[in-house]
Image: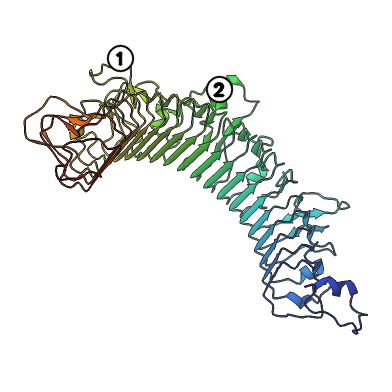
Amino acid sequence: MKTFVQEGISMNLESVNNDDLKKAMFTSKVFFPSLEELYINGANSISALWSHELPTPYLGKLVYLGVMSCGTLRNLMSQSVARGLLNLRRLHIKHCYSMEEVITKGKSIKTLFPLLEELNLKGLPKLKNFFLTEHALQFPFLREVKISECYKMKTFVQQEISVSRESDDEVFCPNLEKLYISGANSINALFSYQLPTSYFCKLEILQVENCSKLRNLMSQSVASGLLNLLRLDIENCYSMEEVIREEEQLGEGMITFFPLLKELNLQTLPKLGHFFLTEHALKFPLLRDMKIFDCHEMKTFVQWGISESTSSLQNVNSDDEVKVDDLSNAMFNSKVSCPNLKRLCIDGANNMSALFSYKLPIPYLSKLEILKVHNCEKLRNLMSRSVASDHLNLRRLDIEYCHSMEEVIREDEQQGEGIMTLFPMLEVLKLHTLPKLGHFFLTEHPLKFPFLKDVTIYHCSEMKTFVKQGISVSLESDDEVKVMFNSKVFCPNLEKLYMSGANSINALFSYQLPASYFSKLEILQVHFCGKLRNLMSQSVARGLLNLRRLEIKDCYSMKEVIREEEQQGEGIMTLFPLLEKLKLQRLPKLEHFFLTEQALQIPLLMEVEIYDCNEMKTFVQQGISVSTASLQEVNYEYVQEVLDLNKSGTKS
């Protein structure tokens, strides 16, 4: 289809341009005075959508225009046609691979599409600009702009060379709320360095992706005008070295950037060294969610200017006790403030040697709820104890693939005695693939996590204990260094514990623990702990009143699950009164579950799976009987003769 109405050969064409009639989809010979929506897709034979000259009211009521996959279109419309689109609110142009400009050059115009609210340009690889003009151009109601896969586009509005410009504000969108730029590989800068303060004052969302030549996002003066920015995303900009470009310093004191910013996402920016270089303290008063992924060169969030002398660093903040390398190597120091930050995710910051300065103002991170740190190769610890004590609202802590980390909390000067509470609201803790981690915290004090519910420790092969006691502390004889949980750490609300690959521990629990120590534990999974000879003592097992699932796999030294202690009294012993599922798998040295002279009852046990326990001959050794009245399923693989598991049960 080349045209909507084809002119007959006999028609007098004196008043109509012949090329215009042959190649334009819509000419002056067809009239839709009330047309509100027009969508064209796959019209590969048209070289023009409209004739260049049309009556002014021709498209005066058009509200939506969508043009997709028109492979021969070099432009969308002439300036004279554009002038008539007084009610256009949405303009989408996608996958028109020959398009070089949207509006063709014509007579001067200052306001284009006066009611336009949404503009989407996508997959236009030859597009160089939206419009070539001599004048500054205004879109008074434009709220959302998306530009993606327009690889040759260098500027939105191209100024003619002959024009003498006093400023760089060729295009003005005073109501723009959302700007998305992706794949603009020909631009060196997103904004001119000097723009009127009100230029983007209503912008709320700014997303910039795959702009390979961008070295920075904006100047300090432009940033200071983004008073309503709520979200900033920058991804896959491989040349970006800093986000905010510093200008001449003015005055002293704290700078507030993006006063309403709530979410910041920096992802795959391999040359990014810092967010901003400045001599001032920087504040983001409402920032709640920060993600920094694959920014391998980033050492610190705010880099101090070269002009800052070493001698004056001691006076930067009298209560911060900052060292020179503390300011340059810590991702967050006292010179950047995010008092409302709730979520912080760091991934792939391989040049960062410290996440936080050792001393920070007390309310620095008091509202942080989620902290995730992954793939940070140089981190040897996560934070100091004084910084940790400020995390009053932390609910989830994930640390993964930090191959140099030796401890999570770094001890500083001890204060007082008695039980220490760290992370009083922490509910979930995950330590994953930290091959050098020896312990969570070294301290002389007992440590309490009052709300901790879920703990995962996975492939921390050097970890010998959760809380390591200081040298001066005298431990009970069974509170050995290689016990993961001893009486010096207390998690009264723990519901789920998953341990895998802790090959340096000899025992999971100390043999003597308070009865309430794990009274709320419901799920216990222990895998690949090569030195464990048993799981727990009888006294510890007796305290697991809520355990519902017990799973032990690939513990090649384990000989028994429950370690017997001195027998007390006679009669039936009840263990794990709520246990429903028991799984023992690939325990080649396991001989029995429990050695005891008492009768054993596990009243609610419904399912037992025993796989590859080749040395196991009996479930309870020397026991008179074992009662599992609720047992519904017993599963043995490589069938062994296991006696007295359930006298009325059957093997399958």
Q: Quadrant of residue 39?
A: bottom right
> Label 1 belongs to which residue?
472
Q: Residue furthest top?
A: 472
Q: Position of residue 14 (x, y in %)?
A: 93, 80
Left/right placement of residue 235 relative to residue 394 reads right
- Establish if 387 lies above or below 192: above
User: For the residue labelled by badge 2, is the local secondary structure a helix, a strand or a loop?
Assistant: helix
Q: Residue furthest bottom?
A: 10
Q: Mark 1, residues whose alpha carbon is within 10 Å: few (<14), some, or many (≥20)?
A: few
Along the line of sight, the residue nearer the viewer: 142 or 624: 624
Q: Position of residue 528 (x, y in %)?
A: 37, 30
User: For the residue labelled by badge 1, is the local secondary structure a helix, a strand or a loop?
Assistant: loop
Q: Quadrant of residue 145?
A: bottom right
Amino acid type shown at disc 2:
Asp
Amino acid type shown at disc 1:
Ser
Left/right placement of residue 165 relative to residue 447 reads right
> Label 2 belongs to which residue?
325
- N-terminal-most mark, 1 or 2: 2
Q: Give me the residue at 43% from left, 41% from top.
A: 370
- Establish if 636 lies above or below 5: above
- Please state, as top left, top right, bottom left or bottom right, where the C terminus lies in the image: top left
Along the line of sight, the residue nearer the viewer: 240 or 508: 508
Left/right placement of residue 214 relative to residue 514 reads right
Q: Is residue 175 shown to the viewer in this render?
A: no
- Please state, as top left, top right, bottom left or bottom right, where the N terminus lies in the image: bottom right
